[in-house]
């Protein structure tokens, strides 16, 4: 009986693909094994991946997640800013200074693009039937522009660009609590229109664990804990076992979403290349 699969891991564009697959140029792991898929058991380090560009961002479908401010970390970009409606200021709210207390940032949702898989990811398929995945995705040169209008409070300019960066950092640090902060190294400087240009690094650690099975050249992974930066992500977590093909040869392992599907329920992720640790 064919067992289903999954793989829990992520990635964006790094290489490690074979041939032409169901989506784009990402290959399927089966093509490199000549009918002998091997054994995926063990602990593996990620050394490459292949993804295709998704047509639309993968938006949270959970009302609590959509209403959370700031938004919980995500691998997909947030909803693009509309041109005629909605928030033009990335939800920035700045209070007026009170006495010697400077203006405070009480709300903001910085923009980020699609982050890429960083080095050091790890995937384990254990002999006791459990698996674990630990991957980090980063965008090193993210930025957001705030117009002069966005920096005002009730018509009065309330914050300088030099103070905006530390205030946004403080807001995200307090919101993250004991979890890692997704937006890091935030610096803001004056822009030509009188507003502020803010630059930063965006980082999301994806951890996943559960149980796995394999038969023939198929893996099945059933997730029991699915986290972004230590926070449970209801809208992204797989709600059923996922399938993947695999090919293990010596100290190498390739895993691909079954019949063009995504790995780890992440839109666009097709193939992971791994090396035994």
Image (cartoon, rainbow, N blue to C red):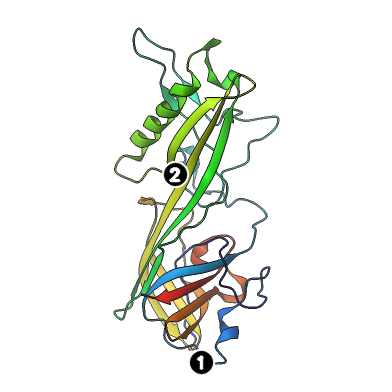
Residue 101 x, y percent position in the rendering = 35, 13
Eyeballing the image, is 97 above or below 60? above
For disc 1, the neighbor class at 10 Å (few under 14, some 14 to 19, many from 20) is some
Q: Which mark is residue 72?
A: 2
Residue 145, image quadrant: top right
Q: Which label sits in the foreground, 1 or 2?
A: 1
Secondary structure found at label 1: loop
Which residue occupies the foreground of this view, 48 or 127? 48
Q: Which mark is residue 36?
A: 1
> Can you name the residue that lies furthest to the bottom here?
35
| In contact (CB < 8 Å): disc 1 and disc 2 | no
For disc 2, the neighbor class at 10 Å (few under 14, some 14 to 19, many from 20) is some
Q: Is residue 153 visible?
A: yes
Residue 115 x, y percent position in the rendering = 53, 52
Secondary structure found at label 2: loop
Residue depicted at x 35% and y 36%: 173
Q: Which mark is residue 2?
A: none
Residue depicted at x 46% and y 23%: 162
> Can you name the residue that lies furthest to the top here?
99
Residue 42 x, y percent position in the rendering = 35, 79
Residue 142 x, y percent position in the rendering = 54, 42
- Identify the mark nearer the N-term, 1 or 2: 1
Give the number of marks.
Answer: 2
Residue depicted at x 49% and y 47%: 62
Eyeballing the image, is 80 above or below 226? above
Residue 100, image quadrant: top left
Q: Is residue 69 visible?
A: no
Residue 167, image quadrant: top left
Eyeballing the image, is 117 above or below 108? below
Mark 1 to mark 2 CA distance (whole Å): 42 Å
Side of 6 where 56 appears, left or right: right
Residue depicted at x 34% and y 34%: 174
């Amino acid at each position: 009986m064919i067992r289903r699969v999954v793989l829990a891991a992520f990635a964006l564009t790094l290489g490690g693909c074979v041939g032409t697959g169901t989506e784009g140029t990402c290959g399927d792991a089966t093509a490199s094994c000549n009918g002998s898929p091997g054994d995926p058991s063990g602990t593996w380090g990620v050394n490459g991946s292949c993804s295709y560009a998704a047509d639309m961002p993968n938006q949270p479908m959970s009302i609590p997640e959509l209403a959370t401010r700031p938004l919980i970390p995500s691998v997909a970009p947030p909803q693009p800013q509309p041109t005629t409606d909605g928030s033009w200021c990335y939800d920035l709210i700045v209070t007026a200074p009170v006495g010697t207390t400077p203006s405070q940032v009480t709300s903001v949702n910085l923009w980020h693009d699609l982050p890429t898989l960083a080095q050091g990811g790890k995937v384990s398929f254990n002999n006791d039937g459990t698996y674990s995945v630990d991957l980090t995705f980063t965008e090193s040169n993210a930025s957001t522009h705030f117009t002069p209008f966005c920096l005002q409070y009730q018509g009065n300019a309330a914050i300088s660009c030099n103070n905006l960066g530390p205030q946004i950092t403080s807001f995200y640090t307090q919101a993250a609590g004991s979890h890692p902060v997704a937006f890091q190294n935030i610096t803001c400087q004056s822009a030509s229109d009188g507003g502020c240009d803010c630059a930063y690094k965006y980082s999301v650690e994806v951890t996943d664990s559960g149980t796995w099975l394999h038969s023939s050249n198929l893996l099945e992974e059933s997730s029991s804990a699915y986290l972004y930066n230590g926070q449970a992500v209801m809208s992204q977590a797989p709600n059923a076992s996922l399938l993947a093909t695999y090919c293990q040869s010596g100290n190498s392992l390739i895993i691909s979403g079954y019949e063009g599907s995504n790995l780890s329920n992440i839109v666009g992720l097709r193939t992971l290349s791994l090396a035994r640790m």
